[in-house]
Image (tube, rainbow, N blue to C red):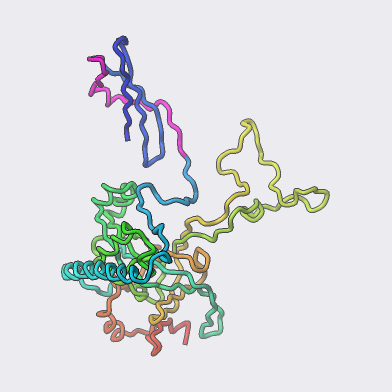
Amino acid sequence: MVVVTPIKSSLLVEVSYLIQYRSHSHGLSSMLRLPWAVGSEWVTPLASSLSNIQLTNATQKRGRRRTTVAPLGTPPVWEKAKGERIDDENKALLSRVYEVERKAGESRVKASEEKQIEAKKDALGHDQRRVGLIVKKIGMMPQWTNDGTRMLCTLLEVPSNHVVSVTSPDEWYRRSMVGKRKAFNRDGPMWKVTVGAGESDPWKFTSSYRRQFARAGTGVKERLGSFLVTQDALPHVGIPLDARHFSVGQFVTATGKSIDWGFQGGMHRWGMRGQPQRRTTKSHRRIGSVGSVSDARIWPGKRMPGHMGWEWSTLSGIQIIRMNTDKQVIYVKGNVPGDMGEWILLKDCLQEGKRPKEVAIPTWTPSLETIVEEEEGEETKIKTDKQVYIDNLFR
């Protein structure tokens, strides 16, 4: 964005314009001084001067590690009026309005389903990206394998996932600053697929937030998340996403917010040793000298007490060892980022040697159920209680 500040003058013969140039992508703010020609009371710029821009002063603006407010331009999510203030008659009226909006969206979604590609089982290509799931961390519990080995697992619930919107790379690049970085990357053009999870009461949210779910023909979702998807694996809007979107034995990548510990000292936050236990007065857990040499200031990035946790963290290469299709629960080996009850983005692992060998593209549908039963292999087996295991690990 270039902001031009005109200088009104009738006495100066040689003047200059001062231009403030602000780069949103790199966070740079600089002042540029260009020569201009005097033609009238208001100074008119020369077109040839734009090719001789010289950067004179640039300062890097540091971003915060965690944000507590929504991005600029994001519509409000929660309705200010509480649901307790609405009587039963108005609640019933609102419920009918929400149902009409949802049915209208379902009719539009069904009309577009005929143009979508059919689901199939195939290996994930090197340049292929699928949509992921939004799961909720239930907790951790041990599992015992056939030889008696104890394996600690994390339970992830898939609470009513639906595709809310699909944005093309061109539109995403034009409307979003994030899209200018991610729509056309080194892996090619990427579509932005937004997924919603968790059903909630509609009257808790604003009309601008509910409108996107009315267009998708789904219920109002509590949580939204976006994934980068290639064109050959695009799901249609409104399709439900099942836990069988992933397969047992597959490696996945989990992204979520780390546990929020609040304000912590240097010993807990950075693992510092602290001061000596003896001959010390009220400084046992302090960080001590901060190493101020030459410039009497604290350098950015210095390890000091502060807010610990609640940052985006990604753990890749975790394996799915069990799945309960009735309860929509996925068992993964080991731990994942976040505390119990937090939302986590789950997607395919792209590490070499851990790419999915056989997955549902673009996603799992009931039509693939017969294919799974007919092609029952040695490693996986469908149990009578609708649970899938790895037979070489579990009975």
Residue 366: name its quadrant.
bottom left
Quarter placement of the N terminus: top left
Above-or-below relation of 219 to 12: below
Above-or-below relation of 272 to 354: above
Residue 353: name its quadrant.
bottom left
Name the residue: 32% across, 11% down.
Answer: 12
Residue 350 rendering spot, x and y as whole percentages: 38, 63
Left or right relative to 74: residue 307? right
Name the residue: 31% across, 47% down.
Answer: 180
Left or right relative to 283: residue 174? left
Name the residue: 26% across, 54% down.
Answer: 189
Residue 228 rendering spot, x and y as whole percentages: 32, 59
On the question of residue 347 being in view, the answer is: no
Total labels drawn: 0
Name the residue: 52% across, 68% down.
Answer: 340
- Per the rendered image, the range of residues in magenta is 38-61
Residue 25: name its quadrant.
top left
Above-or-below relation of 244 to 308: below
| Front residue of this view, candidates 383 and 23 | 23
Residue 251 rendering spot, x and y as whole percentages: 41, 69
| Front residue of this view, candidates 73 and 157 | 73
Q: Magenta segment: does it hold 57?
A: yes
Residue 156 rendering spot, x and y as whole percentages: 45, 72
On the question of residue 23 being in view, the answer is: yes
Above-or-below relation of 121 to 227: below
